[in-house]
Amino acid sequence: MPALRLSFLWRFTLVTLAVSVLTAFVLASTMERSQREALENDVEVAALGRLSVELTTPLESLAAAGRLTPATQRAIRSASEDAQRFEYVTAMRIYRPDGGAVFPTGTPPALQEVRQTLGSDTFLRVERGSQITAYTSYYTRTEQPYVIAVDFNQGQLGAAYARERTQLLAVVGIVTAISFISLLTLALSASRELERRRREAQSTFVQTLTIMAEVIDLRDPYTAGHSQRVAAYSRELAIAIGLPERQIEVIESGALLHDIGKIGVPDAVLFKPAALDPDERRVISTHPALGARLLGGISAMDDVVPCVLHHHERLDGTGYPDHLSGDAIPLGARVIAVADTFDAMTTDRPYRRALSVATAIRELVRVAGSQLDERLVSAFADLVVRGAIVPPPSLADRENARLLGEEHLART
């Protein structure tokens, strides 16, 4: 029996090291120019989104008055100055639909860029030497269109990319070093305290899974924490339906790694701040199979792979990749599908705000029986009602909290 335990501990530690090395290899192979373009895209979307919020009141006032009043001009100038405090932003402009500039006055017209932006479902990106200009459309409540343009310093973005790459590689290097040290420690002391060492190795493995999930989420700031939340929701649901602890652990690990295949999805598809077209949906639909292949060579992942491979199957057989239906879909994958769908609806995305919890639950109930398992949806809804599952606050929630706080301070 001790020999069997020792063999298990050796295999477990080697798997931990292999997973860490796999993470390092995948990151090294993907952090090329596409990773830099992804960072630039994230920065541009974040700056444009923030400006769209700050310019809401002045642009509504401008549309209502039909002219640039002194108060509106001051508000726009304040938003411009605030934007330029952002590390990479050098200037901001606002254009009318005819290409003429609203702010700053006297700015040359940009009719071609304005037309392209208004005719696009996403933002327009133009590179000129060391400068990148991002254009986005804004429509007032009266459907009056304006175009917001923001200039970015490409050199500063390049420096930021280098810092991010160094940080990510440092994290992976630390994980690999910890795993290697664990291997040596277990090899030297396995003759004694086998049970204690086994528990330490399990803890290291869980930490590695968590860091891998964090590395996946780091590729897209808009889904940061998604894998950890889906894992937490899946664990609560698995406990609620009475599964044994071993199966609960498998489902939780599968949920942590359910999106690992997105490492191989092109950034242009993964970070698109709008709905995907049919070709792009076909590309994104390859991530479960890619994730299963990445994990398939690791024996410790044998039970986890079906959860990763089939978490996008639907009960009616219209899901992917294998069009499984009903009970043919592994239970773990069905659990993760409910948690994944709920988190996707209750968190902010570049192209839409988070849905309310009530709306998300109604949507889960609506697709129960066709897309999701009815029994699991019912159990999940009960967990939400009891407060066992609480989604993170949305951008709107945080803004409301800020306004309430300011009102309270003003009254006191």
Image (cartoon, rainbow, N blue to C red):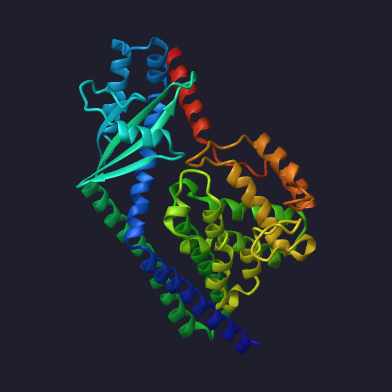
Q: Which residue is located at x 61 percent, y 83 percent?
A: 5
Asked if 294 appears above or below 364 in the picture, the reply is below
Q: Which of 149 and 225 is in front in this view?
A: 149
Label total for image: 0
Q: Which residue is located at x 33 percent, y 15 percent?
A: 72
Q: Where is residue 366 in the image (x, y as percent from the top left)?
A: 75, 42
Asked if 220 appears above or below 150 in the picture, the reply is below
Left or right, 37 with respect to 268, comes to left
Q: Work out whether residue 412 can be spotted.
A: no
Left or right, 304 with respect to 21, comes to right
Q: Quadrant of the C terminus?
A: top left
Asked if 27 appears above or below 375 in the picture, the reply is below
Q: Which residue is located at x 59 percent, y 75 percent?
A: 300
Q: Nearer the viewer, residue 27 or 389?
A: 27
Q: Where is residue 107 in the image (x, y as percent from the top left)?
A: 22, 26
Q: Nearer the viewer, residue 177 or 225?
A: 225
Q: Work out whether residue 181 can be spotted.
A: yes
Left or right, 125 with respect to 351, comes to left
Left or right, 333 with respect to 145, comes to right
Q: Position of residue 138 (x, y in %)?
A: 42, 28
Residue 113: image quadrant is top left
Q: Position of residue 84 (x, y in %)?
A: 26, 33
Q: In which quarter of the image is the N terminus?
A: bottom right
